[in-house]
Amino acid sequence: MTAGELPPHWPMVGREEEIKELKSAWSSWKSRILIVSGPAGVGKSRLVEEFLRLLSAQGVASRRVVATVSAAAVPLGALAHLIPDGVDLSDPVRGFAAVARSMAGEDPRDTAMLVDDIQLLDGTSAVLLRQLLDSGSVRIVATLRTGHPVPEAVASLIHGDAAHWVGLGEFDEAGTDQLLQTTLRGPVARSALQMLHTAAGGNVLYLKELVHAALATGQLHHDGETWDLEEDWVPVATRLSALVGARMAAVEPEARIALDLLAVCGPLSLGDLEAVVSASVLARLESDALIQCRTVRRRTEISLAHPLYGEILRTMLPEHRRRQLLIQEAERVSSHGARRREDALNIATWRLAATGEADPVLLTRAASLARHAHDYQQVITLLDALPESEHTVATRLQYGEALVELAQWEEAEKLLADAAQRCRTSEEILAVTVARTMNLLWADAVTEHCLAVNDEARTELPGGRYGRVLDTNEALIRTVSGEPGRGLAVLDTELDPDIRQSADMNVWLTGAIMKGMGLAATGRTAEAVHWTRRAYDTHVEVDDHAMVPHPASQHIALCFALTENGDLLQARRVGEAAYQVLLTDRAPLPRIWMAFFIGHAEWLAGHPVTARRWFAESVALSRRQNQSRALNLGLTALAAAAAVTGDLETASDALRESRSYQPIGFLAGQESLGRVWALVSQGDLAVARTELAEGIDRARATGHTSAEALLLTELARLGGARAAHARLGELVELNDGKLLSARVRLVNALAVRDPERLLSSAEELDEMGADLLAAEAAAEAASLWHQCGDHRRATAATHHALVSSARCQGVRTPLLASLRDTITLTDREREVARLAAAGTTSKAIAATLHLSVRTVDNHLQRIYSKLGVATRTELPAALGTVAVVEESWA
């Protein structure tokens, strides 16, 4: 897709409630003037156009009045085209009456007068419209731009009992996501969504211009699954720059100083700005919505009102002026003693941006501050400016850890290997060894290589606490590489309860993540949830003293643990909140795994479309970060999510690519899911079961009880319940997760073909949020009751299955196949059912449809039987279920 292929008017998405409110107000004669208000660029005119289009479909004509600055200079300039020839307006009373008489022949219910930008209407036009409104000659739909002065005559027109206001705000991130998905006809990567939403600030006009510009330059592109932006994307569009630039050019010189300073130095304190410009100037800038204030602790912080203002102002600044502002601000903050914690980082950054160099001590201190803020790119920028003679093992370690977090594996290994040769103390050897093994681990090095580097350090370090750190480091390497039981045995004993007793906080924090993952993978789910929550709280407490990883990384393990414990909704909420933090703080490596485990929770909930989007996010990030360790698992999961919704082409492509990467080892056996569901979609269940059996063996051999339980459940769903239930019964003794217990009851019910137990299982799974398993259990119960001839109970179970499956995003599985032809009403039965559901009597239905009352009653009996209900009062809910299901299978 290119910019030229986008629709000229973006779709009306996310404004459904406002449209509904306008329609409701229009239907009430009391509301004779409807006003859509909001800031510039939020789509007020577009919303009104859509509303008028809907009115037109009902036979309502429209007259248009465009209020402009130029038309406002001439009395009645905006309404001149509506005034009949020969009307003398020199006498306003008679003239206005004549205009009202000319419109009296039209039914105001059948005509809408559109007034765009009503705040620009001249006073005479406003008075005329007021008289027409009071006389009942017109009905008005108007847009009003907030933040602009409204003349008194216009204010009199738009306020009062006859007016109905609909406020239109800027989109939140979810609204931006919905709009972009609809416009681009596909999902948008979370990083791209955040960048576009932040840049546009929820403004539809700005968003449209930015997307057009990014498509035209190729910076917004489709990777086959999602739309993504280049990392170096600069949010500027030519037409947008001109629009904002014109507004900035009109600002008074003193105010422009403040705007330029904010553009190059970022948010500043109120005190810093008042040292440059007067308080009255800042007050005017705030009232003009060019700057905004917020309280941070006890400080008032000032920033530009919109992110785009900074981008555009910087392009308008001459280079010498930009440098001058940076130096002046650095000197100003330094002269006050640079007392705030962030001052050192700001001063170093400003001086570096202005002159290309800064004091080495200041650079080193600033790099540490940036590192603790998890701004890895800034760490590299600052340390790049440090002269070689000033580098130490500590600065090389900082640089190397930042490279690891940014997935620059080769550069990190080169730098950390060099740092290892310069180590002199035990603390330095330990820290560099840990950083280096983590880099090698995620760079897809052979596990033995990572362990060899760890073992080499054992020969150089004394035992005791140093040895315990190396043991912990080895354990987390083994956990990641597919030995969760072996790794957990060490982590259980070697991870000090108190992090402050550890010789290396970073290893403790990383080990805490892997302990949580190991606990969840081996079935100790309740302990996993408790441990990961505690680990996160500990991480937050010591984050000022730790270097890696990001605190939100702890929630990767928590998301996984909650999922295995059957808290599927909570797992998704925790994961999505953590992902947003990682995205904001630009931590790409943990985002890969956070996206995967959110997708995993969605997959187990039975939401394959949402799961696919998260798996695609994980895959895209893995490709971008050259993280091959995650790609096999992510691609096979993506293939499964695509296959289960019938997209075999995408599933085949993902499986083909996955064969280029070795399985990571963790969650062994789950990599078979993609091929399994691709085979199921092709109808080859026997081969799919064979594939599952091999995956089950891999999971069992490596101690992955959670993966084994998942695969055994899949086997049962594909006709192998009798083969699966015995082993699942053994696993439930090793695994305390509520999800596994529910699976065991489901599989046992499938194995003995007991519809009562199946329906009970469906209810349990529904409460857990496992929608697909619930739907399948109820569908199988319905099938068994049909076979027994108990059609009423079969119909009730079918309804349960339909309600649950309606939440499963079009999923197709063998156990749901029977639902496709279930509950079919004839056209006549549907007519009768809908009238009866609305409370219409049989006699009235008969008169409406020209039938006998007996025929209507006979239809109703057949409808009750098909829908599994006994009375008319149950019909609305039953018919709602049928409608949902018909749509989901369309």
Image (spheres, helix red, strand yellow):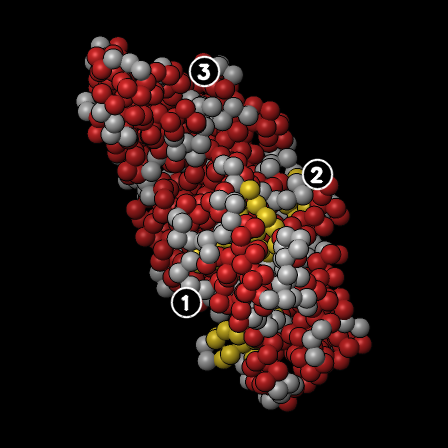
Q: Is residue 369 above or below residue 60?
A: below
In the image, taking residue 852 as reference, residue 13 lies left or right, namely right
Q: Is residue 267 above or below residue 529?
A: below
Question: Can the viewer see residue 74?
Answer: yes
Which numbered disc covers residue 646?
Answer: none
| Label 3 packing within 10 angstroms: few (<14), some (14-19), many (20+) | some
Which numbered disc covers residue 5?
Answer: 2
Q: CA distance from mark 3 to mark 2?
A: 42 Å
Instruction: Tell me which amino acid carries mark 1.
Output: Glu
The residue tagged 3 is 685
Q: Is residue 565 above or below residue 701?
A: below
Q: Position of residue 433 (x, y in %)?
A: 57, 57
The quadrant in which residue 779 appears is top left
| Label 1 packing within 10 angstroms: few (<14), some (14-19), many (20+) | few
Instruction: Tell me which amino acid carries mark 2.
Output: Glu
The earlier-in-sequence mark between 1 and 2 is 2
Residue drawn 68% across the image and 68% down it: 73
